[in-house]
Image: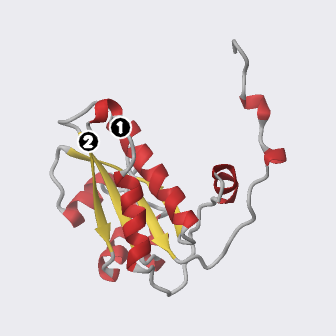
Amino acid sequence: MELMDMLLHRRSIRKYTDESIPEEKLEKIVQAGLLSFAGKGLNPWEMIVVRDKDMLKKMAGCRNCGAMLDGADAAIVVLGDSEKSDTIVEDCSIVMTFMHLMADTLGVGSCWLQGRLRDAADGSVSTEEFVRNLLHYPEHMKLEAVLVLGMPAQQPEAHTLEALDHTKVHQETY
């Protein structure tokens, strides 16, 4: 698949079948994240792969839109090491993007669930604190996002080049 075709085809998928993601596909998704680039080559990110259905069900409370985790087959939590770099937001976002694109290429549905600066579904704590309490990562590791994964129960239509909003692009000056 050509890169432009991949970009046009990629859509967020929030509903999944009961089919398991083959282990080799999940491994390729993780490898795509590991291949991402980072500021100064520091790679200040780490990932937690979650496949346990009970844990995914618990994680669904991390956001008001986190219910998709309850029906997911897996999730990859992307964390940035705040002691290692000051570019963890950017670097973790690149990891998420690479994995998101790889999932689509492999026919695996995925959705980016933002964690940073968000609150748990019940509003009692931040999404970060909610997820940290479940997965026990250290304080210096900061939650960027969760990539929710499953075999797609739906496939929205691809984007088209004609539908792009070219008014967002400015030449030479604003």
Question: In x, y percent, where is residue 14?
Answer: 56, 69
- Which structural element holds mark 2? loop
Name the residue rendered at 23%, 58% in the picture. 132
Front one among 126 and 91: 91
Query: Could you give the CA–CA distance between mark 2 and mark 1, rounded to whole angstroms?
Result: 8 Å
Callout 2, which amino acid?
Answer: Pro
- Which structural element holds mark 1? loop
Marks 2 and 1: CB-CB under 8 Å?
A: yes
Instruction: Give the numbered dot on residue 87.
Output: none
Q: How is the image coloured?
A: secondary structure
Name the residue rendered at 32%, 57% in the picture. 124
For the N terminus, give its image quadrant. bottom right
Q: Residues within 10 Å of mark 1 (few under 14, many from 20)?
A: some
Residue 154 vs 138, above or below: the answer is below
Taking 116 as reference, is 140 left or right? left
Question: In x, y percent, where is residue 6?
Answer: 64, 56
Would you name the residue on which mark 1 appears? 38
Would you name the residue on which mark 2 appears? 44
